[in-house]
Image (tube, grey):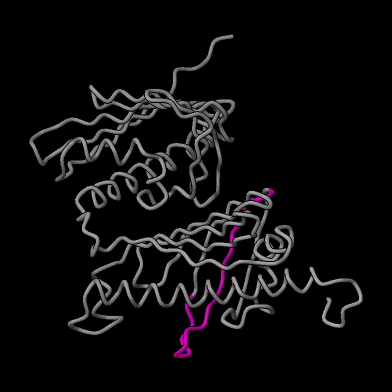
Amino acid sequence: MSHPAPHRAEHGISVAAPAQRVFDLIAEVGNWPRIFPPTVYVEYAEHGPTEERIRIWATANDEVKSWTSHRVLDRDRLVIGFRQEVSQPPVASMGGQWLIEPLAADRTQVTLLHDYRAVGDDPANVDWIERAVDRNSRAELAALRAAAERSGSPDGPEFSFEDAVHVAGSATDVYAFLHAAEGWQERLPHVRRVVLQEDVPNVQTLEMDTAAPDGSIHTTKSVRVCFPLERIVYKQLQTPALMSVHTGEWRVREERDQLVVTSAHTVVIRPEAIPQVLGEGATVGDARAFVRAALSRNSTATLHLAKEHAERLARPAGSPDRS
C-alpha cells in the first residue's frame, strides 16, 4: 500500500550566541520545559551518547499530547534528528531535524525541519498539524533564542529552589492529597477557586485562583503530569505577571528510611514586568526574592497540610483525631 508524500515545514531564526551553547540547550531535554513554551515535561526512556528515546508531554493547539521520539545527536555536525515512534492522532507520523550553523563566534543560524503525515491524510487533520507545527515551531525558536542569549549569571532571571518536609505517614496518602487538587479549595487557605480536568488518566489541567497576603488574587493555569505514588510534574501555562516561566514538581520518596516530600520550582523572571509590579528601581534580584518568597510560602503551606493529612491517617485506629 502506497503512502502519500509527507508534508514538510521549515522554520529558522538567527541567535546571538555560540553554536555550541545553542546545540547544548536543544540536546539536553531537561532544559525543554523551561525553554520551550509548548513543552510540559520530558523524560528519557533510553539515553546514550549519540542515540536516545524520549517521552514528551506538550501542548498542541491548546490540547495536551504525549508521544515517544527517537533522537540521533551528531555533535560534530551540530545536527539533531528526531522521529516520533508513537504519535498521537491526528498525527500519523512525524520527524525532522535541528540544524545548528555557526555564522560567527557569537552568532548562530538555527533551522528546524519537520516532515509529517496525518491520519488518513484527511485535509482537516493536515490543517490541524500544519497549524500546530507552525505555532509551536515559531514559539520554540523565539524561546530558544531568548534562552541562549540570556545571561547564565547566578543573579540572572532564571533560578531554581526546593522546599521539603519529613512525613511520618504513608506515601500513598501524601500522593493522594497532592493528586486530588480538586479538593484544594477546601483544604488550602490560600486557594480560592479550583477547576481540575483529567480527560486522560494522570494528565491534568489545573486552573486555580490563589490569594496573596495583600488580598490580591492571581489566576494560574497548569498542566500536570502525574506518576502515581512518586511525583507530579507541572508547568504553568498562565503565570503571574513577574514570571515568564514557572515549572515545578511534587516529589514523594523514601530517603534513609524516612518519607521526604519535596516541592521544587524553576522560574524565569520577566524583567520588563518588574517596574509595574515592584516599582521603579526594583531589580531582578528583588523580583527573584519576591517570587521565591511567594512560591515558597504557598508550597510550604501545602507540604505541611499534606504532612498533617498523612500523619493523621497513620494514627492507630480508634484515635479521636483519625479521619
* Image position of 264 (left or right of 17): right
Residue 185 can be seen, yes or no: yes
Q: Quadrant of the C terminus?
A: bottom right
Magenta stretch contains residue 138: no
As drawn, the residue found furthest toward the top would be 1
Magenta stretch contains residue 213: yes
* Image position of 16 (left or right of 216): left
Q: Quadrant of the N terminus?
A: top right
As drawn, the residue found furthest toward the bottom would be 214
Total labels drawn: 0
Q: Which residues are magenta?
A: 201-218
Q: Quadrant of residue 100?
A: top left
List x then y, in percent, for residue 87. Answer: 56, 31
Residue 115 can be seen, yes or no: no
Magenta region, main secondary structure:
strand
Which residue shows up at 53% across the image and 66% down it? 164
List x then y, in percent, for residue 176. Answer: 71, 61
Which residue shows up at 31% across the image and 33% down it? 112
Along the viewing direction, whichever of 157 and 83 lies nearer the viewer = 157
As drawn, the residue found furthest toward the left would be 104
Which residue shows up at 62% across the image and 72% down it? 194
As drawn, the residue found furthest toward the front would be 256
From the viewer's perspective, is residue 47 above or below residue 293?
A: above
Along the viewing direction, whichever of 25 and 310 lies nearer the viewer = 310
From the viewer's perspective, is residue 222 above or below residue 68?
A: below
List x then y, in percent, for residue 308. Answer: 69, 75
